[in-house]
């Protein structure tokens, strides 16, 4: 049996993702990818997604399907919608970082 070096073992292990350890993915649905590779669904719809800079954290989604901006927080191990703001059908609207 061949010896496995520490360098070989480290190269095959999941590496931490810089800047917080999670990636936010948006398109046909909004998902969060953890450094371990685990994917959790935030929103099953099309939209632009942003990390919430507020004190509660979470994800803000500008939904393309509902003409609304939605807030999601991680509650009890699941992403749960906690707020909704109607924005109308303005695709070019932007989320302010503050």
Image (cartoon, rainbow, N blue to C red):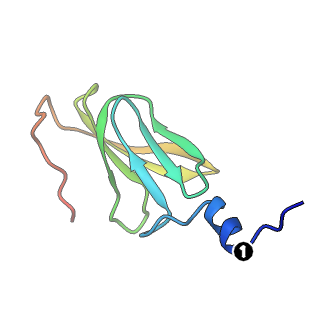
Q: Nearer the viewer, residue 61 or 33?
A: 33
Residue at screen point 48% across, 58% down = 22
Q: Residue furthest front?
A: 2
* Residue 44 pos. (x, y %): 44, 29
- 90 vs 11, left or right, is left
Residue labelled with disc 1: 6
- 15 vs 81, left or right, is right
Residue at screen point 10% across, 33% down = 90
- 18 vs 76, left or right, is left
User: Does dot 1 land on a helix, a strand or a loop?
Assistant: helix
Q: 42 above or below 12?
A: above
Which quadrant is the N terminus positioned in?
Answer: bottom right
Q: Nearer the viewer, residue 62 or 31?
A: 31
Q: Nearer the viewer, residue 94 or 84?
A: 94
Q: 23 above or below 70?
A: below
* Residue 64 pos. (x, y %): 25, 30
Which quadrant is the C terminus positioned in?
Answer: bottom left
Residue at screen point 46% across, 42% down = 31
Q: 57 above or below 88?
A: below
Q: Nearer the viewer, residue 8 or 43?
A: 8
Q: Quadrant of residue 68?
A: top left
Mark 1 closeness class: few <14, some 14–19, many ≥20 residues within 10 Å: few
* Residue 62 pos. (x, y %): 26, 40
Q: Quadrant of residue 10?
A: bottom right
């Amino acid at each position: 049996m061949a010896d496995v070096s520490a360098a070989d073992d480290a190269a095959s292990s999941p590496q931490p993702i810089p800047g917080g350890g999670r990636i936010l993915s948006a398109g046909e649905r909004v998902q969060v990818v953890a450094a371990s590779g685990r994917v959790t669904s935030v929103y099953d719809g099309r939209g632009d997604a942003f990390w919430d800079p507020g004190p509660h954290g979470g994800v803000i989604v500008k939904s393309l399907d509902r003409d609304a901006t939605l807030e999601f927080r991680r509650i009890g191990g699941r992403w749960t919608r906690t707020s909704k703001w109607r924005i109308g059908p303005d695709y070019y609207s932007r989320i302010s970082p503050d």
